[in-house]
Image (cartoon, rainbow, N blue to C red):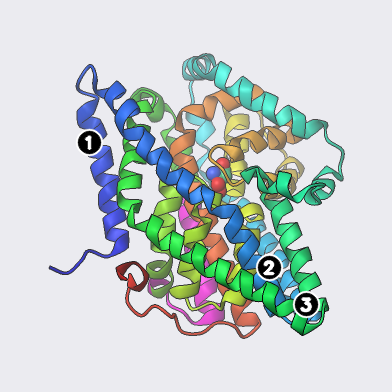
Amino acid sequence: MKKLALHWQILLGMVLGVLFAMVMTQFEWGNDFVSDWIKPFGNIFINSLKLIAVPLILASLIKGVSDLKDISKLSKMGGRTIATYIITTVIAVTIGLAVVNIIQPGKSITQETRTQLVESYKGDADSKIAAAEEQKQAGPLKALEDLVPSNIFKAASDNGNMLQVIFFAIFFGIGLILIPEDKAKPVKDFFDGFNEVILKLIDIIMLAAPYGVFALLAALIVEAPSADLFKALSWYAFSVLLGLGLMMAVYAGIVFIFTKRTPKFFFNGISPAQLLAFSTSSSAATLPVTMERVEEHLGVDEEVTSFVLPIGATINMDGTSLYQAVAAVFIAQAFGMDLSLSAQLGIIATATLASIGSAAVPGAGMVMLVIVLAQAGIPEAGLALIFAVDRPLDMCRTTVNVTGDAAVTMLVAKSVGKLGEPKAKDWDDNYKK
Ligand code: ASP
């Protein structure tokens, strides 16, 4: 029998996970069973992905930068990468604002639902507000200051410090370009080999992906809040989803216009990473797979993926910025506030910055939303309104975040002449070995 392609296997794992959990919730002991005996396997899967994120960034970026051979190439690619990331994020926020202003989901929230939601989720919202408080206290240059680690081992020991690791890797790579070749060679060879090992580990981990996502989704279902709350928020959720859908179309469009690659090719190539982003709600955990897919299946040279994708996973979050725009205006509407044009333009700026500042982990976008709300003068307590549906929306926005990184990587690759034919001809070439 022909083996099922990886993305189908993952999809099957997801569907079976949901069905399994739905059956389990019918039994009194079902929820505990899933939490105690199924969920840990999901955690093991996510941990194994996170485990290789830091070594992967180190090895691939050091190799990537040192392969560039001269600094001008690096600054050219760096400039284009950052510019394209910012442009796509601004497009995303604008789409979010347009959708939420047209649909006006907040207007359909009754006073009663609002009180009920605020009461049920007050505690959860407070903890997010407290987390955001620390960020708000910081001075304007804090983000820049945080970029430079004072100790690389300390930075590398925390997955939340990805940008610091990226900084070190680029810096190290630059050093490697500048020293004599005979001295640089053994160091480069080491990182080359190291990189290969990490890529192999990703292949191995991906073999477990269908089982991992089964466990992750089953655990999510048994922990989900009641369906009634979902209903009250359905227009809001619909607005976010519509915006995210439009953003996907934007990616397909720009990839087609600038690289002549069809949407089918693009989505076929990236789909396992999308499914993983959906199941894990973490761009950082998905990064190893995104890199592998963009390189092997979308035909982008390693020189570009190793530089553009780790940066994208940490700073380019189009889905998150779009969601923040929709959520902010939704909350304002629900509280009966009318936002002026200048307040909405302010949201474009803060949501863009807030999405750059969001960590690539589940729920991070919501913490940073507090800052967008504060800036626009919208009550922070409104966070409690949207809590019930945040996790499913997080799954969807993370999928868009990852897709956006891949699309931009293709554009940058094309602009520096590093977009070729995919190495893996067959869908799952890598996983078959
Ligand atoms: N979970 C998202 C990500 O990792 C961030 C967010 O919460 O929006 O990309």
Mark drawn on residue 62? 2
Q: Are marks 3 and 2 in contact (CB under 8 Å)?
A: no
Q: Is residue 282 above or below residue 429?
A: above
Q: Position of residue 27 (x, y in %)?
A: 20, 20
- What secondary structure prevails in the magenta region? helix
Residues packed near mark 2 inside 10 Å, few (<14), some (14 to 19) or many (20 plus) = many
Q: Earlier in the sequence, mark 3 or mark 1?
A: 1
Residue visible at 83% across and 35% down? 138
Name the quadrant containing residue 25. Answer: top left
Q: Position of residue 202 (x, y in %)?
A: 45, 60
Is label 1 within 8 A of ligand 1 (CB to nearest ligand atom)? no
Q: Earlier in the sequence, mark 1 or mark 2?
A: 1
**Ligand 1 found in image quarter:** top right
Mark drawn on residue 177? 3
Most foreground residue, 308 or 110:
308
- The amino acid type found where label 3 is placed reads Ile
Segment colored magenta:
242-264
Most foreground residue, 356 or 68:
68
Is label 2 within 8 A of ligand 1 (CB to nearest ligand atom)? no
**Quadrant location of the C terminus?**
bottom left
Position of residue 377 in the picture relative to residue 200 (left or right): right
Gap in angstroms between the C-alphas marked 3 and 1: 53 Å
- The amino acid type found where label 1 is placed reads Phe
Residue visible at 49% across and 77% down? 256
Q: Position of residue 294 (x, y in %)?
A: 49, 70
| Residue that badge 1 annotates | 20
Gap in angstroms between the C-alphas marked 3 and 2: 10 Å
Residue visible at 12% across and 68% down? 1
Q: Is residue 148 above or below residue 422?
A: above
